[in-house]
Image (cartoon, rainbow, N blue to C red):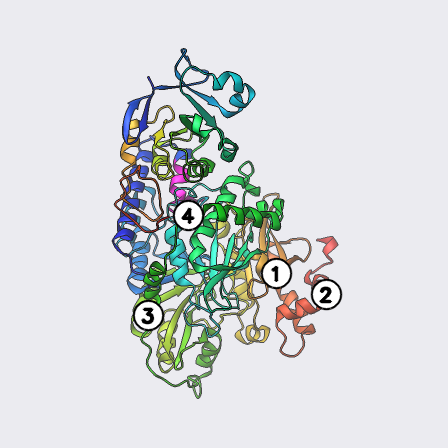
Amino acid sequence: MRRILRRREIVVDDWTHLGEDAVDGAALIVPLAELRKDPGRWWQWSGRLGVRLTPVDRVEELADELPRLDLVAVEFPTPVDGRGYSQGRLLRERLGFRGELRAVGAGVRQDQVFLLARCGFDAIELTDGEDPDAARRALQRYDVAYQPGSPETAIRRQRFFA
Amino acid sequence: MYQYDELDQAFVDQRVAEFRDQTRRHLAGQLSEDEFRPLRLRNGLYIQRHAPMLRIAIPYGLLASPQLRKLADIARRYDRGFGHFTTRQNLQLNWPRLPEVPDILAELATVQMHAIQTSGNCVRNVTADHLAGIARDEIDDPRPYCEIIRQWATLHPEFTYLPRKFKIAVTGSPEDRAASEVHDIGLHLARDAQGNIGFTVLVGGGLGRAPVIGQVIRDFLPLAELLAYLEAILRVYNRHGRRDNLNKARIKVLVKTLGVERFREQVEAEWQLSRESAARLPATEVERVRSFFRPQPYEALEDFDASAGREPAFQAWYRYNTRPHRVSGYRAVFVSLKAHGQNPGDMSSQQMEAVAALAERVSFGLVRATHNQNLLLADVRQRGLYEVWLELERHQLAMPNIGTLTDMIACPGLDFCSLANAGTLGVAKQIQERFDNLDYLYDLGDIEIKMSGCMNACGHHHVGHIGILGVDKHGEEWYQITLGGSANGFTALGEVIGPSVPKNEVAATIERIVEVYRALRAEGERFIDTFRRVGLTPFRQSAYATHPAAA
């Protein structure tokens, strides 16, 4: 049972990644490349559908399909690959995505979660070995911020606004 | 100067708590060195040759006396009683102990200081002209905008993990004293036809392995759009900058690959699309920050020649180590950290305390760090200059060599830095010894030597009139010399004079080079102007003891 951080709470993950055991009707996360390769199959999937982006995927190309997606997973291959933060903000702020925005990958650790949440990620799938409780506490490391950001963190005072 | 409000203070305090927890986890074996590295770098902490090195931020170089006193105190209690001022107006401690670094950061936070983002691939300390607010040619004081950018860039959720380090400089005068054209972003304050404040935006400058001069991508950016536009540039860079090769990851490579026109189009398009969701900069916030940088309560005084009738040593100091001020009756005073026999930029705790006290007596309690690795007392009454000189002399801070050949820039080099290929401090000493005659230095006039111990160019060697780059040649320290670089006003990159020279030949080679200048110069012509007029050839022909082909 994978546990993830979703909106400040630790919950059992109700999604499955392609390649894991997916029963018919399961909520399934499919890599964008796979979705492009076999769109007929995946858009007909019996359960809820999510897509997984790599750092080089252009989020703009998903614009028309976003309303049909319940989840977008953005991959952080390492803690220092920051491209996913831009992808996250663009999905939320420019493309208006309102489904679950999830950070995934080996780079998703407790020291990243505050930034992720400020960029609009409401679900955080920690890499193996990371302690979800520590990650949940890490969301509260700061109660002030300079920049605008999503309300997933407990910011009481902020300098700049959008 | 800017004073923290409750938000700023809460932020630095929480940052210290976060780093304390990260350090604890690292020391407990829960965070490997690889995992800890990006976290400690974003708090200014390197692991160096002998020990950790902590780079403390001095935003746009401005320090209040209590802050300088705190730095002195930290250097004494946690280090070896001295610090090193850098070309980015920061202060480096070379011997802190890792478990104590969180305590040092906590001490800094008590005087509104930090070491946030002084290293790592993120937006670094924003730098400015050291004569900001007092220069006669200034359009507007750049420091409020530096402070605004500092805050905007601090733990920016989108831009904390960029492809590579990112440096921004702001200058308010037509004469660029902040080397802004060799920054990732250079902002030149400007006014439009209606007199509104804004910026000319340059992008893609940088030194390091492949030096490039920045190019203008926008002639005039209205002030209110500052943060939105920076955000657009950073977003294009964060998404498209290379991450596969550290040596090609600076924004200058992206600008070059796309071409400046296409880069500009992408930034402008991004800006148009993101203006609504980007951070706004309301006039009230600009006013709030500007209010901390109002002119000092100057007395109404007349200008006079403070050096008239004084002894020659004071006259020399007055001429070389002080500068005009926009307010009559005042001058700006350099505190020289270039005494011969001392490492350029180094300062002892005792000297810091002396300058902190002096600043309180004669310069409104403020001190500035300059990118030439000196300090500046910006607002000194001309009639008090003699006493200031005596006091600086007492602490070996009055070496009258500012702007001369021995006012050189040098990174810490192989003696401290784990990136360096060659030593810089021994070479600096060699140059100081060879050029120890002040009359000879004065005859040579305005010459900038800039020296780096490796390609990363912390010593800005590419833009030195004479640049010195340490290279490793089969395990030996050799030095490549460039001529004709400049970062002031007219930015130019130096040209390599020929084969590199061994360590013991550096000062002698420089002497031969400046002798060529002495032979060829026109009346009153500076070294750099002679070089631009006659070119590299005559220097190359005479620079080597033997013919270059034999070296």
Residue behind mark 3: B359
Checking the image for residue B492, the label placed there is 1
Q: CA distance from mark 3 to mark 1?
A: 35 Å
Measured from the top left, where is residue A111 in percent x and y? 35, 36
**Three-letter residue code for mark 4:** Ala
* Dot placed on the residue nearer the N-terminal end, 4 or 3: 4
| Crowd tier of the residue under label 1, counting other residues whose Cα lies within 10 Å: few below 14, some 14–19, many 20 or above | some
Measured from the top left, where is residue B163 in percent x and y? 50, 41
Element assignment for label 1: loop
Q: CA distance from mark 2 to mark 4?
A: 54 Å
Residue behind mark 4: B278
* Dot placed on the residue nearer the N-terminal end, 2 or 3: 3
Checking the image for residue B538, the label placed there is 2
Q: Chain of mark 1?
A: B
Q: Which residues are magenta?
A: B36-51
**Three-letter residue code for mark 3:** Ala
**Three-letter residue code for mark 2:** Pro
Q: Is residue A63 above or below residue B330?
A: above
* Dot placed on the residue nearer the N-terminal end, 2 or 4: 4
| Crowd tier of the residue under label 4, counting other residues whose Cα lies within 10 Å: few below 14, some 14–19, many 20 or above | many
Residue most extreme to the bottom: B309
Element assignment for label 2: helix
